[in-house]
Amino acid sequence: MSGFDWQFFVEVLIGGLLSGVMYSLVAIGFVLIYKTSGVLNFAQGAMLLFAALTFVSLVERGVPFALALIITFAVMVVIGIAIERVVLRPLTNRSPMTLFMATLGLSYILEGAAQLIWGTQVHGLDLGIDDVPFEVGGVLISQFDLFAAAIAAALVLFLSVFFRYTRVGLAFRAVADDQFAALAVGLRLPRIWATVWAVAGLVALVAGLLWGARLGVQFSLSLVVLKALPVLVLGGFDSIPGAIVGGLLIGATEKLAEVYIGEYFGGGTESWFAYVVALAFLLIRPSGIFGQKLVERV
Amino acid sequence: MAEHDLPLLVVDGVSATYNHAIAALQGVSFAVRRGEIVALLGANGAGKTTALKALSNLLPAERGQITAGSIRFDGRDVTATAPADLVRSGLVQVLEGRHCFRNLTVEENLITGGIGRSARRPEIADDLEKIYLQFPRLKAKRRTLAGLTSGGEQQMTAIGRALMSRPRLLVLDEPSMGLAPLVVRDIFETLRKLNQETGLAILVAEQNSTVALKYAHRATILENGISVLSDSTENLRNGNDVTKFYLGERTVPLAVAKPANQLTEAGT
C-alpha cells in the first residue's frame, strides 16, 4: 500500500463531504416537519423545485436578485401555510400512512403547478459563484461546494439559534416532544405547524437554489428527495444534527466508494451506494445515529 | 352577584364515545364552585380521565366525541372552545401521567405554561419566581431535563407549568399516580395551600380515595361511566356500606360480603 495516494484520498473525501452538505440541506427540511407533526413530507422535493423554479423565472423576467429572493420566500411561506390549512388540518388524527400519501399527492400537485406556471424548459441558475477549484496544500477544493457548505452551515446556525432562544422555538420543541401535552398546555398547534411549514419552505428555497445552480433548474430537481432518504435513515428522522452528520457520511462514502471500489462493479456506484449503506444501517441501528432515544428515568 | 353564585364548572349529563363506537361516559354530572376542591373518584376505567379530557375539550384530539349533555366553564360552552382558548380563559389541566416535555429543562417546561397563556416576558419571570417559592425543588432542578427528574419532581413540574397559565380552575388527573406517600402528601398540601391562599378552584381525579377525601371539600364517584354519588367528603368519609363499596374499602356491600370473607379465609 506504499503507493496509496493520500492527497487524492483527501481530495475525494473533501469533495464527498461538501456534496454531502447538500444532501443534509434537503434532509433538514424533512426533519423539521417530521419532528413537529410526525408527517414524512414527501413533497419536500417538490417544494424545493417550486422554490428554485419560481426564483429563476423571476430573475429571468428582470427581477433583481434580492427582490426575487424575498418574493420567492414569501411565496414559500404562503404555500407552507396553505398546505397546513388545506391538506393537513382536515387530516388531523389520521394514520401516518394517510398523511404520507397526502404529501405524495401534494408533491405531484406542486410539481405540476410549478411547471404549469413557469413552463417545463430547463433553466440555468447562476448564483455568481465560479465553480473553479482552488488548491489548499496540494488538495483541490471546489469553490462552489465550499460556498454551498458555508450557506448550509449558516442556515443550520440560524435554525439552532431560532429554536433555542425564541418563544416560537421553545413552543416548537415542546410540540416535537409531546403533542398532546402541548395541546393541554394551551399552545396553538395549527399556528406552530404553519410556522414549521414556512421554515421548511425557507429550507427548500435555500436547497433549491444550491441544487439548481449545480444541476440546472428542471423537473428532476424534485428527485433529490430520494437522496435525502438514506441520509434520514442514517441520521434519524427526528434529529437535525443527525441530518447533518448523515448527509456528510453519505456524501463521503458514496464518493469514496465510486473512486475506490466502483471499478469492481463497472462504475456508477454513486447512484445506488447510499441506499446500500442505508440498508446496512437499518439492520444495525434502525433509529439512526441520532434518532430519538427516550430520555427516561424509571 | 347572581352570576357568582353559578358554579365555575358545570358538567351536566355528559355522555362520550371514542371512535363513535366505544362508550366511555353515559351520563356524568358534577359541578365545581369557586374556591372549592372537588374530587372525582372511581376505579380504573370508570371514566375519570375521559370526563377530564372532555371538560378541557381534549377528546377530539383522541378521536373521542361528546354525544350528549353539556359542559360549561364560567358560562362558556367548552365543546365550542379550542383547548388553547380554554387555557387562556383559566381552565388548565395537569394530564394523567404528568406529560412533562422530557427533552426540555424544568424551567423551559414552566415557561411553556406562560406561553400557553400568551404572557409577556416580565410576567413569565414573575410567575417563575412564584412557582419556585411554591416548589423549591424545582428551582434546584431548573436546568435539568425534565425527563431525568424523579416522578415527584415531574409532577411538580407539570403542576407548576399549569400554574404558569394562571388558572382559575386547576384540573389534575391522578396526581398521586406512582408516587411515594410522602410526596403525595406534599403535593396535596401545596394544592390545599394554593386553594386557601388564592381561592384557586381545584378538580382532582383520584384512585387514591383516602387522600382525595382528606383534602377535597366535595366528591363525585364515577362507576362505569356514570356519576353514581355526589356528596361532601365529610359525609362520604362517614358513609354507609354503599359508599364504602364504591370507594373500594369493602369489595362488596355487607349483605353479600360473607361468601367473599369465607373465600379469603379458605385462601389463608
Image (cartoon, coloured by chain):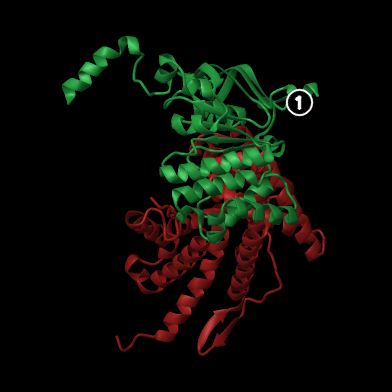
Chain colours: A red, B green
Q: Is residue B95 above or below residue A298?
A: above
Give x and y (percent) for residue A209: 66, 62
Left or right: where does residue A57 sit relative to residue B110? right
Near mark 1 (Cα within 10 A), the count class, few <14, some 14-19 or many ≥20, is few
Q: Residue at x 61, y 34 (%)?
A: B202
For badge 1, the amino acid type reads His
Q: Residue furthest top?
A: B255
Chain at tag 1: B
The number of callouts visible is 1
Q: Is residue B100 visible?
A: no
Q: Quadrant of residue B268?
A: top left
Q: Nearer the viewer, residue A133 or B159?
A: B159
Give x and y (percent) for residue B150: 44, 52
Give x and y (percent) for residue A289: 42, 61
Q: Residue at x 52, y 40 (%)?
A: B188
- Residue pointed to by mark 1: B4
Q: Could you tell me which quadrant the N terminus of chain A lies in?
A: bottom left
Q: Quadrant of residue A215?
A: bottom right
Q: Residue at x 30, y 14 (%)?
A: B257
Q: Nearer the viewer, residue B47 or B9?
A: B9
Q: Nearer the viewer, residue A153 or A227?
A: A153
